[in-house]
Amino acid sequence: MIEIDRDRVLAYRYAVQQLDRSAAAIDELAVLPLGVPDSPAGSAVQSVRTRMPGAEIPDALALAWSVRGSAHLHRVADLPRLADQLYPLSDADVLARMPIMKSVGAPLAVFGKTVTAMREYSLEPTDRGSLSAAVTREVPEASAWCRACESTHVFYSLYLQAGLAAGIRLVRESGRLRITAAPNWHVPHQTARLDELIRDCLRVLGPSSIADLAAFLGTNANVLRPVWSTDLVEISVDGKRSWFAPEATTALSSPPTPRGVRLLPTGDPYLQARDRTQLLPDPTHRKALWRAVASPGALLVDGEIVGTWRAKKAGHQLQVDVTAFRTLRSTTRAEVAVEAEQLATTRGAKSAAVGFDSI
């Protein structure tokens, strides 16, 4: 067993996720195999520009409902493989990902039926509500009355998680979501490459326990254990039993020291691993960063989360309010101001103003 500490894990994650701004091209970003979360809308572009300032999103990238049914930015070429990898393994896997499906007989079969319906009704461009209504008619056994919508519709978690297998692509236009299906799409029926996805996760997120990786994928450890590769390397991270991809152990052994200030949006890949205690040891700080709703972004300084931030556009200016967990040096504050100007450009503002507070 290899023994390492959290500092080395965080340094590795910082480097492998190219927060050091070492990427030469967008389509080479190492975070793309798992996707860049786009919740809230537009945050994926900011995550990309945090790694490559000023970058424009090429047509080779697209939004799709993927990991945990959430919108992510991916390489279009990666999506067929990812759809195979994320297709549920069993009835138990479906129930782990979507507990609401416990009311349905043969959950895996119903998942497949939903995928077929999603595909059929998205071959022409549509919107979220119209597609949901069409799928609800085809899958009434996985539908229920929604008090918020005052209508009966297909289980929302099922609707989202069936989208990738159906080949659905998402386009945001003027605040609205347009949905269409990729042409010439092979609909998967059963995953056969989840072990490959596990290795991708470990390479991008760093050493993880089986339970943490299962939580990242939205399932549970009992589902992953039977497909857990026997050649994965056992790692002890400050005494916590974890696993890692053997081909990346050299990079983990001596990662470069993280340098720089970054304003990470809510959902940035750096924040996605489920080792939150390791990432941010202070429970008060974790509570401030990860909220049930409307979480702020994270202020990252030399690989450590040292505060949170929120931004609001007022006219032509973006107001960025930082809440620090510790006293920030003047040089750090100056770098925050530089990053805020980049954020302003992404948000369509001409300039940024930064305010500082402490927790």
Image (tube, rainbow, N blue to C red):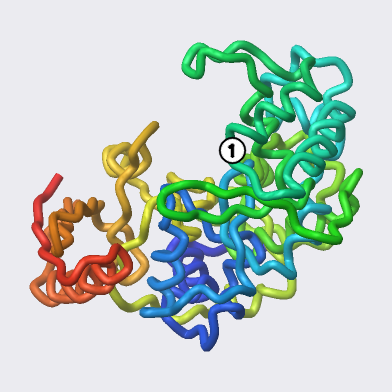
Q: Is residue 354 above or below residue 289?
A: below
Q: Residue at x 30, y 76 (%)?
A: 260
User: In this figure, which residue is indicated by the disc labeled 1?
Assistant: 128
Image x and y of residue 103, in percent: 75, 12
Q: Seen in the image, is 77 located left or right of residue 358?
A: right
**Horizontal and vertical percent for residue 120?**
81, 41
Q: Would you identify the image quadrant in which residue 156 lies?
A: top right
Q: Is residue 19 above or below residue 98?
A: below
Secondary structure beneath label 1: helix
Mark 1 neighbour class, 10 Å CA radius: few under 14, some 14 to 19, many 20 or more: some
Residue 67 vertical position relative to residue 257 in the rendered view, above or below: above
Percent x, y of residue 287: 32, 37
Horizontal side, residue 205 vs residue 116: left or right = left
Q: Residue at x 24, y 67 (%)?
A: 344
User: Is 346 positioned to the left or the right of 325 in the image?
Assistant: right
Please tell me which residue is depicted at 45% across the width and 57% down the height of the picture.
Answer: 268
Instruction: Report the quarter where the C terminus lies.
Output: top left
Please indicate, yes or no, whether residue 66 appears anywhere in the rendered image. no
Q: Where, quadrant-wise, is the N terminus in this rendering?
A: bottom right
Q: Is residue 84 visible?
A: yes
Give amino acid for label 1: Arg
Considering depth in this image, is 308 or 346 the residue closer to the camera?
A: 346
* Residue at 57% over, 67% down: 31
Residue 249: which quarter of the image?
bottom right
List x then y, in percent, for residue 297.
32, 53
Question: Is 148 located above or below residue 112 in the figure?
Answer: above
Q: Residue furthest front?
A: 124
